[in-house]
């Protein structure tokens, strides 16, 4: 175990206090998916990002046709471009919660500093954490959720993570 553990949530908190916002890169090309055609990005397209109906971001696509969209889990985010609307979300695509990488993915969404993502499908219920940041993230999560801080991601930690993810609408 690494150093002392200090809870980062108030006892009266109803949900996790730091949801991590991710940037999703979306590319617009002249002829996507068509063999032999020009695949250059469409540069200079105006786009707007709406979050729960409120404009939060506006910009132009870069030379590769890329629009950067900031997305938080459980929040309806819409990209408006070329007269169309696209819903962008972070929901889904996680590894199983029983695997260390799945735990790290979920903790990253919740704002924990996890370090490098673990590469294989090793079970999470072990004391052998892949790096110091991953161990600290588990300790902080356990402290935040009134669990015994032992850095082992066991059944109680798994249950708590599932609950937090569900409550934050991130899964």
Image (cartoon, grey):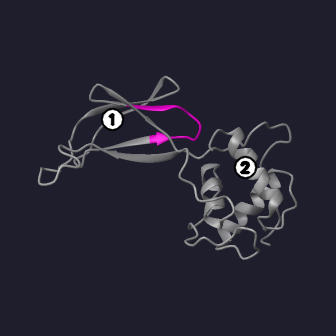
Can the viewer see residue 6?
Answer: no
Mark 2 or mark 1, earlier in chain? 1
Q: Position of residue 70 (x, y in %)?
A: 47, 41
Can the viewer see residue 37?
Answer: yes
Q: Position of residue 103 (x, y in %)?
A: 66, 60
Helix, strand, or loop for circle 1?
strand
Q: Position of residue 64 (x, y in %)?
A: 24, 49
Tell me the distance, in whole angstroms, between the alpha carbons under discs 2 and 1: 36 Å
Q: Place residue 112 in its image quadrant.
A: bottom right
User: Which residue is label 1 attached to?
Assistant: 59
Looking at the picture, tell me which residue is in the foreground, 151 or 84. Answer: 84
Helix, strand, or loop for circle 2?
helix
Vertical arrangement, residue 145 with respect to residue 46, above or below = below
Q: Is residue 166 left or right of residue 60?
A: right
| Numbered label tally | 2
Q: Is residue 50 left or right of residue 36?
A: right
Q: Quadrant of the N terminus?
A: bottom right
Residue displayed at 64% across by 38% down: 169
Residue displayed at 82% across by 56% down: 143
Residues shaded magenta: 70-79
User: Which residue is label 2 attached to?
Assistant: 162
Vertical arrangement, residue 78 with respect to residue 112, above or below = above
The label nearer to you, 2 versus 1, is 2
């Amino acid at each position: 175990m690494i150093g002392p553990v200090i809870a980062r949530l108030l006892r009266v908190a109803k949900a996790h206090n730091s949801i991590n916002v991710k940037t999703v890169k979306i590319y617009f090309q002249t002829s996507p998916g068509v063999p032999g055609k020009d695949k250059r990005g469409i540069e200079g397209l105006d786009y707007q990002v709406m979050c729960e109906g409120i404009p939060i971001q506006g910009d132009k696509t870069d030379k590769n046709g890329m629009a950067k969209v900031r997305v938080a889990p459980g929040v309806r985010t819409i990209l408006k471009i070329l007269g169309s609307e696209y819903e962008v979300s972070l929901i889904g695509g996680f590894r199983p919660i029983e695997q260390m990488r799945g735990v790290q993915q979920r903790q990253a969404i919740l704002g924990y500093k996890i370090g490098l993502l673990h590469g294989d499908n090793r079970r999470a219920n072990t004391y052998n954490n892949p790096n110091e940041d991953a161990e600290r993230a588990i300790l902080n999560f356990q402290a935040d959720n009134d669990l015994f801080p032992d850095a082992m991601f066991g059944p109680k930690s798994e249950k708590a993570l599932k609950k937090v993810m569900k409550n934050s609408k991130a899964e």
